[in-house]
Amino acid sequence: MFRRLLSRYDLALKEKPVLVKSITSCGICGCGDIFSQVAFEKTETVQFRRTLNFALLGGLLVGPTLHFWYGFLATKFPGQVAVQTIKRTFADQFIFAPVFLGVFISSLSILEGESFRKNLQDRWATTVVANWGLWIPVQALNFRFIPVMYQVLISNCTALAWNAYLSRSAHMGQSVLREELLVDPADRKPM
């Protein structure tokens, strides 16, 4: 059954790559927000408007943007040898990611009726640093070993946890997140 599902996904990916990656990103971003609400924030009821905003950004911003960005990187730095992987990872994390995170934070702020300038000022730098901690090793492995057509899928799978972090960061005080990043996990109090 899994092979059949993977085969269908593969065929759809070849026929309509942007659409498939957009739908996948929509679902992953929405699930990341629900995961954040249930697992981290311990909300009694899921805030579906908030989840819809995350899913909308996944489908309209994340999926299509990553499709074209990864395609550009594969063309600009062809092959999966170590030197090209380093170049792709550097471009992805030190050129693309800071800009894209700014666009994501701004877009989410606008969808939620908040000041994008204030949210950028409050959250952008912390989010970029947290991004590097997760995504530099993930993207190095992704660019080195995964065929280009599946790189967005691998990013989406990793993004389930990342989107939970983004959601939590968007909906909790930034000072709380900064403290959590600096505290040894063994010293954290249960939530």
Image (tube, rainbow, N blue to C red):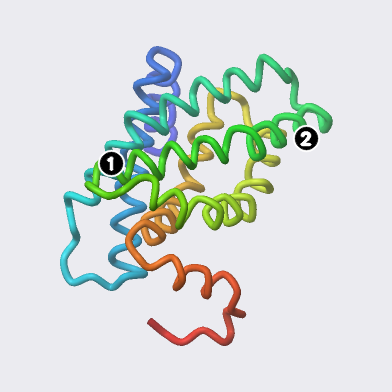
The one nearer the camera, 41 or 176, is 176
Q: Is residue 176 left or right of residue 34?
A: right
Q: Which mark is residue 129?
A: none
Which of the marked residues, 2 or 1, is nearer the chain's N terminus? 2
Examine the image and state in which quarter residue 63 appears.
top left
Q: Residues within 10 Å of mark 1 (few under 14, many from 20)?
A: some
Q: Tell us which disc is closer to us: 2 or 1.
A: 1
Q: Position of residue 72 (x, y in %)?
A: 60, 18
Above or below residue 16? Residue 30 is below
Q: Is residue 129 left or right of residue 86?
A: left
Hey, what amino acid is under mark 2? Ile
The one nearer the camera, 144 or 170, is 170
User: Circle 2 sits in a helix, a strand or a loop, which is it?
Assistant: helix
Residue named by callout 2: 86
Q: Position of residue 55 (x, y in %)?
A: 29, 41
Residue named by callout 1: 110
User: Circle 1 sits in a helix, a strand or a loop, which is it?
Assistant: helix
Q: Position of residue 131 (x, y in %)?
A: 57, 51
Furthest-right residue in this view: 83
